[in-house]
Amino acid sequence: MRPSAAARASAALAAGGGIFFVAAVWIARAIRPELLVDPEPSWAPARLALLLFAAAVPVAAGGAAAAAILVWSGRPSFDGRLEALPFSRRALVALTLAAVAAGAAARVAWIESVPWPMWVDDLSLIAPTRALTGTLADFADPVRAAPYGLPRSFGTVGVAYLELWRIALRELGVTIFSVRFPSIFGGIVSLGTAALLGRALLPRGGGTLAALILAGLRWSLILSRWGWQAVLLAPVVDLATLLLLRARRRGRKGWPIASAAGLVAGLGAHVYLSAWIGGAALALFAGWPVRGDRGRLLRMAAFALGFAAAAAPLVLVRAPGAPRYFARTSDHNMAMEVRRAGVRPLVSTAADALAAPWIVPDPTERHDIPGRSRIGWILGIPVAAILARALVFPRDELSGWLLAHAGCAFAAALAAGQATHPNGYRYGYLTTVAAIAAAGGVLWLLAEIPKRGRRPAALAAIGLLAAGGLVAARDALFAWGESRETYDGFHGQDTLIGRAAARWDRYGEVRVDPELGFDPRTHSPVTIAAVRANRLDPALDARFRAGDSDRRAFRVVRPSAPADPGERAVEHVRDRWGRERAVVYGRRIESPGSRTAA
């Protein structure tokens, strides 16, 4: 399949224009626009030199990208075919199973201690989730605030999701494992759905590569250990995509399956707000103009109706005083930023969104290793290659799927604003998309190699991907899991204080000073209370062992708080970096009758 001259030119313009825009914004941001328009006469020669430099770099970068696509796509041997992996079906099945098993093990290993702190969003919902009855009465209000129990919450979660979590808490008990079970479950199941989706979208071996890549994708590994709703959305979107692919291949008769795909995608809205972004991408893909496809508008409408039917209760049903489902979007968005700071946030967000997978790290410390790009160079090269192919062959099915997801994620990033952008948690469902894009890029790059050398090249590629996955697993478990940035990002002092209180609960009455949770930027009394009440500490016996509780009383207070008469410090609560977070004062009570609250 040879690309037309118009398709080649459009692809070159899109790629070159995007890189020109990113380079121009970054150069202007580094130099500062004020400096470039400063009217000071004595600054004129230097200002002219800076202007020329600021113009030359983006033009050179964008021109080089456009020229590379034109030259690459203009070769006589260039076509859009992806070659299958040159291995037997038995070998591919074995490699897929090994990748899924290794990926599952990496997501479960040391789950009670990596990451060490617990997070307020899920801890705060333990009590309301356990209070659910498992009946339709739970859905009188289909939404709960997250975090729950705070004076002001910044997000919501669907009760349908909490019903699933309630089963895990009931069957497994309230432990660190059960609290993190939705993340673990979503991460492991997504390995299987990614393999199935890669098999459906790519030639033979595509599903194997997708599973291998996702198994060692640091982005997915980290979210699978704490991502709660975000990573659980990934297999939901994957299943909806599999149904939609079947609907597309049935042409005009596929609209009932497209409606079922919309229902599945709409159920994702009960899990996490980002389902609306993924749903928009799948609706766009349902109507994507692919050669020989018929009935796409009917299919698109059927998908949209299915999604709306599943998601409607979240918007239409609301109990008095309950949080609004879209509270997160109204709390902060690009419109607010533009009103405050003009167009700069819009321009910067657009540039960072285009470059985020390869260059721009996540600014939120708990989401990833600070300073690291989302996918790295091993995966970045094939992802860039498959996106370039998508621009040259936009009417291919794989291209339509990738461009639909990329376009909707880009639009959502612009709407959400610059704060916490680029946000790897919010777009956790794209871990599957990234894995399949990288797998497709590997297959396309292998197709450029002569047949005689394709098998050794495929073995080398698999070895490189496996090695990269091992490094990513090490980084997720140790570099990220044990870092001070991750600890602080999770407000680890709250877990530390909650566990200290739980330890002393065995020996007497313990009162935690409310002032330990006074600053919402660094403390959460909800976390402290939940960790203590549920004894979420792997070092503690799950069974409560009451000690000489009628003879001692304790206070957990700020490090600067003085001891009361008769008290002495029994523990200084410090983190692993030596920072003192609290002090525990204890005192004896002379007799049970004279005991007073500490």
Image: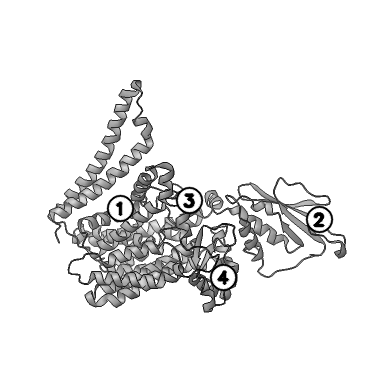
What residue sits right under mark 2 in the picture?
587
The x and y percentages for residue 442 are 28, 59
What residue sits right under mark 4 in the picture?
129
What residue sits right under mark 3 in the picture?
364
Q: In the image, is residue 392 above or below residue 103?
A: above
Answer few, some or many: residues within 10 Å of disc 1's Cα (few below 14, many 20 plus, some between 14 and 19): some
Mark 1 belongs to which amino acid? Ile
First along the sequence among labels 4 and 3: 4
Find the distance from the CA under tag 2 to the CA under tag 3: 42 Å
Answer few, some or many: residues within 10 Å of disc 3's Cα (few below 14, many 20 plus, some between 14 and 19): some
**In contact (CB < 8 Å): disc 1 and disc 2:** no
Give the number of the mark in front: 2 or 3. 3
Q: In the image, is residue 23 above or below residue 216?
A: above
What residue sits right under mark 1 in the picture?
381
Find the distance from the CA under tag 1 to the CA under tag 3: 25 Å
Residue 90 visible in image:
no
Give the number of the mark in front: 4 or 3. 4
Give the number of the mark in front: 1 or 2. 2
Mark 3 belongs to which amino acid? Thr
x 47%, y 66%: residue: 105
How are the colours assigned in the image?
Answer: one colour
Looking at this view, is 396 or 162 the one in front?
162
User: Element at badge 3?
Assistant: loop
- The numbered disc on residue 61 is none
